[in-house]
Amino acid sequence: MSHFALSFLFHTKNYMSKILPKRSENYSEWYNEIVKRADLAENSAVRGCMVIKPYGYAIWEKMQRALDDMFKETGHQNAYFPLFVPKSFLEKEEGHAAGFAKECAVVTHYRLKADPNEKGKLIVDENSKLEEELIVRPTSEAVIWNTYKTWVQSWRDLPLLINQWANVVRWEMRTRVFLRTAEFLWQEGHTAHATEEEARSETRQMLDVYATFAENFMAMPVIKGAKTETERFAGAVDTLCIEALMQDGKALQSGTSHFLGQNFAKAFDVQFVNKENTLEYVWGTSWGVSTRLMGALVMAHSDDNGLVLPPRLAPIQVVIVPIYRVEEDLQKISERIEPVIKELKAGGISVKYDTDDKYKPGYKFAEYELRGVPVRLGIGMRDLENGTIEVARRDQLSKESRPIEGIANYIKDLLGEIQQNIYQKALKFREQNTFRVDTWEEFQAQIEKGGFILAHWDGTVETEEAIKAETKATIRCIPFDEAEEDGMDVYSGNPSKQRVVFARAY
RNA sequence: CGGGGCGUAGCACAGCCUGGUAGUGCGCACGGUUUGGGACCGUGAGGUCGCAAGUUCGAAUCUUGCCGCCCCGACCA
């Protein structure tokens, strides 16, 4: 016994560097470690800003591709607007200005000069002060609506369906990699329409696009709904959102779509002449998802062995690890596996054949698990003799030996099955962690345990804020698919027509 | 902005209390043995101990100031 105990103690430190913190013990440390160890991103030298590493960026690119295709299918075009927003633009829509004012980076000068007092140092050249400060965009409504004014004259110019992929900056007090960084990448759609109805349906259409993306690509079930007044986007009439449940029981807003009414059209004087030759303000929408989705992806599916990627977003869908002693064996293995690789690639599957001899197979197994590669194939001399190959699934951490004959087709199906399985698992988790609650005592107890709470709300800001103050729970959304029913507000006891979704949120 | 922690090799840390040769593990380079779940042996490279000032014969270590990072809260996609 003492021998084991001693040897365990002696080696503990070494092992510690190889295993992840337990998800159940320290969720945020577990999250940070996965992001780091799976090579998705790291904290940069710049406070609050992250470096997205190639593997992480490859996932983001897959997200971009899928979303971009969906935007194009729904008639949108990409464009690009400036990073800098003159302060006067930002001021024009009052609610908008108030909402973003306290988190803006401001450019006041355009030049540096050598410090006369200290060699090698630079100081701001006071002679380069800007007449008007430039704001680094926290979002682009202001610049874009200022531009739309010149683009829209007639009803024939509408609808205007534009999207841009860009970076934005919001000076957050506290940041977390992917979930809340000072600078982040996103897409922002900005559309203008002739009628309210059309703008409202655009708002809803894009929310549906996000939900479809979340569920079909990220394998992450979401609740669609509308934000309450307090949670609404600054400058919007209505904010719709998709809300996902993370494995620690906290909610994550994963996408928003705003109906802007005529707020920005009026602020920036964007009018068009309708068919009856009268001037009208256009109706606007804006909608966005960001690199926060990367955080959602990690927190929705991963486990104590690392990242779990849904096949549709995995940069490497299948990794093949050869197991051999001598060079000749590797050659034999390669000869047998090359046609399989070709077949997989022909089927549109991304494959990595890892012949790197720096690491042993065991190391590679652990490493690809950490990185969430959905399927791993192991093939050695024993397999060549038996005509088999080892197939390992990341989502279930299971292994089986299969005939190598027809393996490519098998894997094609398997990837689909894994995609489904990951989604079903996440859906089941959400269902098991969604609670219908009718009393305040129950509510208080349940919110401590996490999860979505469906409870009645009287529709007042006062109640919403009181609940938040007492429990830190916010109304994530007023869900679309929840049937109306008469009830009593869980806090105030006032009459209510519908349950809303409460949770503690990121 | 409050509360806590931390800055020593690429990474994780020890050394600091009680001042005197800068260390361990991982990683890295080279050579050899290994390879079906994170291999091993040997040799080697790698440091303005966060920055600045002070105390001292002498500072990673003591004092003061500053800077930065992380965690927990208040604000937020």
Image (cartoon, coloured by chain):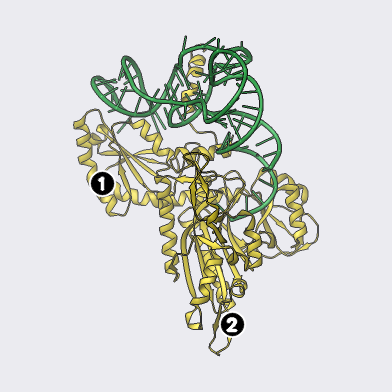
| Chain identifier for the yellow-coloured part of the image | A
Q: Quadrant of residue B45?
A: top left
Disc 2 chain ID: A
Please tell me whether residue A78 is drawn above or below residue A51 in the rendered image: below
Disc 1 chain ID: A
Whether marks 1 and 2 lie on the same chain: yes
Q: Residue furthest right?
A: A493
What's the residue type where badge 1 is placed? Answer: Val
Q: Earlier along the polypeptide chain: callout 1 or callout 2?
A: 2
Q: Quadrant of residue A368?
A: top left
| Residue A330 at x, y percent in the picture | 22, 34
| Chain identifier for the green-coloured part of the image | B
Could you tell whether A326 is left or right of B1 in the image? left
Q: Residue at x 69, y 43 (%)?
A: A448
Could you tell whether A421 is left or right of B67 in the image? left
- Disc 1 or disc 2, which is closer to the eye? 2
SS assignment at label 2: strand
Could you tell whether A481 is left or right of A209 in the image? right
Q: Residue at x 20, y 40 (%)?
A: A335
Front-lying residue, B11 or A413: B11
| Residue A68 at x, y percent in the picture | 43, 62
Q: Which residue is mark 2?
A: A280
Q: Residue furthest bottom?
A: A276
Residue A207 appears in the picture as rendered: no
Q: Which residue is mark 1?
A: A340
| Residue A280 at x, y percent in the picture | 59, 82
